[in-house]
Amino acid sequence: MSDTTSSRAESSPTRDLPKSPGSAFEGRTFYIKTFGCQMNVHDSERMAGLLSAEGGQPVSEPQTADIILVNTCTIRDKADQKALSDLGRIRQVRKDGPGTILAVTGCMAQREGEEIFRLVPDVDLILGPSQIRNLIPLLDTAAEKNSRVDGTLWPVPEMTTPPALRPPGVSAFLTVQEGCDKACAYCVVPATRGAERSRPVGDILQEAEDLVSMGYREITLLGQNVNGYGKKGDTAGASFPELLQRLSEIPGLLRVRFTTSHPMDMSDALIEVMATAPRVMPHLHLPVQSGSDRMLEKMQRGYDLKTYRRWVEKLREKVPAAALTTDLIVGFCSETEDDFQQTLSAVEEFRFDGAFAFIYSPRPSTPAHGWGETPPREVSVERLERLQKRVEQQSMERNQSLVGTEIEILTEKWDPETRTAFGRTPQFLTVRAIVSPDQSDPVPGDLLTVHISQAARAGLKGNASPHA
Ligand code: 5AD
Ligand code: SF4
């Protein structure tokens, strides 16, 4: 999953959500700052939805907010540092007075627990990702008691989905699965997001239909191991490929995406539905992490490179247009130059359409914490740079190979002044398309066929083909 830092939930126009009558939050302002992955972005949308349903008003500056939520990530040490420095800034500018609340939510809050109160003394409330459904009672308790509240100690509520306040647009996130049962030696997520659980299929289909009626045309299904959906029999009968098939049949829903998949939960049926359901987009984000079997074993990933290769070959055979993206870690415990060379060869072999590469960051409460034997920092930095350079070259080559082709984009934005439509290809590449004055203006949500004329590393440019 890609990292994002945003505060968009609070700065976007409000969609109408049902409000509870006479709520204690009526007219109170809230500000949410988000760090981390798409799951966190969507968690912020849900917290904004809960507060709006109680009559809260989103604001775009912490200075003017009665309630401040800092939704943190803890995947690497840098994420902790970013959140702590933001909290340092926010506590200087927050409003004083009774009823104002500074809450730390998300993965760092879950991992650190009450240590947060020591690190940032004027925090009033902490809660982890699985406590979002308790947000309102927790805020009430924090306001009433006028003392610190540790929500991570409250019982975890049922997996129902609070109403989300999403930014208006064409594309929406939808959670289908939460938590992670894997035991990757480096990863803090099982400790912060708990055990895997899936939402019943009926709830997901209903939410998707509601999103279409609100004007969204694309949904991205979110889960830590999205393709592990339904494995535990908690979805009222649907497997992940079946869920994709059913979503792809919803009238008006033009595109369905999903992230992140785990190689251990891959199935032929998933590849089959990508091949046969045209609205299921041909893009698979399948983290490989390393090209060295020795490292994969140490990382406790549960597969070797041969198994990963088999899935890639199947995908490319059945879905030739598919984009394959990945995550890579360098500098894991005891990684040698030879291990790293194997990662570079994997990148050479699989020609990923994109890769997020990271330097291993030891995390408290993970199996590998304390194993040590990491390469010197400058060696890891240099490996990361070599890897990123090669991935970028490959992206550039791939983008250039698309010059001269016609590609369909889903219009996300339209600028009438420059007559430019902005959208994405099925493979998730960004495209800027000039629409000539004798063609009708597209609106967000329209599919446009674009003749690609230029490629850059960040995306493609072209001209909209005249409508048939
Ligand atoms: N250090 C570096 N990268 C990590 N990731 C997860 N945990 C760590 C860590 N401790 C990376 C993995 C994962 C992505 C979301 O973040 O590549 O797929
Ligand atoms: Fe997302 Fe992982 Fe960061 Fe939590 S720790 S916000 S799950 S990337």
Image (tube, helix red, strand yellow):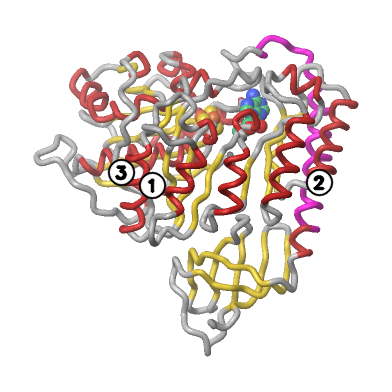
Task: Indicate left or right for 42 with 191 as reference.
Answer: left
Mark 3 vs ligand 2: CB under 8 Å? no
Q: Quadrant of the C terminus?
A: bottom right
Residue at x-position 44% and y-position 66%: 445
Q: Does the magenta stretch include residue 392?
A: yes
Provide the residue designation for mark 2: 389
Marks 3 and 1: CB-CB under 8 Å? no
Comparing labels 3 and 1, the label whose residue is closer to the camera: 1
Q: Earlier in the sequence, mark 2 or mark 3?
A: 3
Q: Residue 9 carries which label?
A: 1
Task: Identify the amino acid type marked 3.
Answer: Thr
Residue 414 in the image: state x and y as whole percent. Answer: 48, 71
Residue at x-position 86% and y-position 37%: 345
Which residue, as the protein is rendered here, is positioned at the far left?
Answer: 22
Q: Residue 64 carries which label?
A: 3
Which residue, as the protein is rendered here, is positioned at the far bottom?
Answer: 438
Mark 1 vs ligand 2: CB under 8 Å? no
Instruction: Please report the bounds of the magenta region as a residue range.
Output: 368-397
SS type, badge 1: helix
Task: Indicate left or right for 420 with 163 as reference.
Answer: right
Task: Identify the amino acid type marked 2.
Answer: Lys
Q: How far apart are marks 2 and 3 (CA)?
A: 43 Å
Q: Measured along the vertical axis of the image, is residue 221 above or below residue 329?
A: below
Residue 460 in the image: state x and y as whole percent. Answer: 67, 65
Q: Quadrant of the N terminus?
A: top right
Q: Measured along the vertical axis of the image, is residue 256 above or below residue 28?
A: below
Picture quadrant where residue 458 is located: bottom right
SS type, badge 3: helix
Q: Measured along the vertical axis of the image, is residue 378 above or below residue 284?
A: above
